[in-house]
Amino acid sequence: MSEQTSESTKPFPGSATLHRWWKSMMLSPDELKADDIRPAPTVYRAELKRAGSPDAVLLTSGFRALWLSLPDEVREEKARPWTPLAWATVAGVLSLINTDMEGRFAMAVGQVDAETDKAKVSELRFAQLQGAKTPEDFYRRLCRIVRQLQGKVPVRSLAGDILTWYDEHNRTLPRRADKRLSVIWAMDYYRAAEAKH
């Protein structure tokens, strides 16, 4: 792994809980039994997939189940009033993922399709995601990309990246350029495309 890694590659508070929650909606009964996880009601995923914005996700039973299962340190963080909206974005986007992949999100986006010899997601669409200014635009663009990848995305990496995006867009503290999510995503995207050649 390179020195320039996304914070999403590190475990974040609530990452284990989030992964169990996602598995409860996606895995088969046999896989859930092996992991000692109770299956989630099918309504969780259905409501989340229909939600068109992070605000709409906040009103779903699937989000409520995730939120109430998160550690207190996540739910009660006073310094980050945007935390519920960030986790709603995570819940909504993750409901579209059906296969958890290894690696980092931007590398999955930049992978070259063997049939077309082009990145799975175009540079333009990826740049539009990076340029998103509002939570609604960010959410809409992420959902579009996850669908384009046919739901095959690294769950924890994407979740960590979403939380990082909210931190960067809601704090006034400057970050070193090489630590900003957009720079890390760009490096991962082009590194994945280059790996094919």
Image (tube, rainbow, N blue to C red):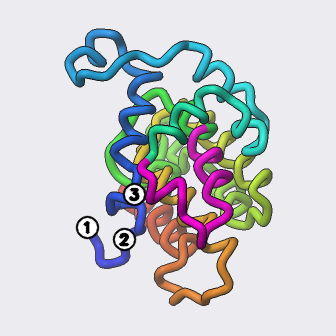
- Position of residue 126 in the picture relative to residue 32 (left or right): right
Mark nearer the N terminus (3 vs 1): 1
Q: Is residue 96 visible?
A: no
Q: Amino acid at mark 2?
A: Thr
Q: Is residue 154 visible?
A: yes
- Position of residue 131 in the picture relative to residue 14 (left or right): right
User: Are discs 1 and 2 less than 8 Å apart at CB?
Assistant: yes
Residue 181 point in image, percent of width and height: 54, 71
87 falls in the magenta region: yes
Q: Tag on residue 144?
A: none
Residue 58 point in image, percent of width and height: 70, 39
Q: CA distance from mark 2 to mark 3?
A: 18 Å
Mark whose residue sits in front, 3 or 1: 3
* Residue 27 picture quarter: top left
Mark whose residue sits in front, 2 or 3: 3
Q: Tag on residue 5?
A: 2
Residue at 49% x, 61% y: name it.
Answer: 189
Q: Which residue is mark 1?
A: 1
Residue at 49% x, 51% y: name it.
Answer: 158
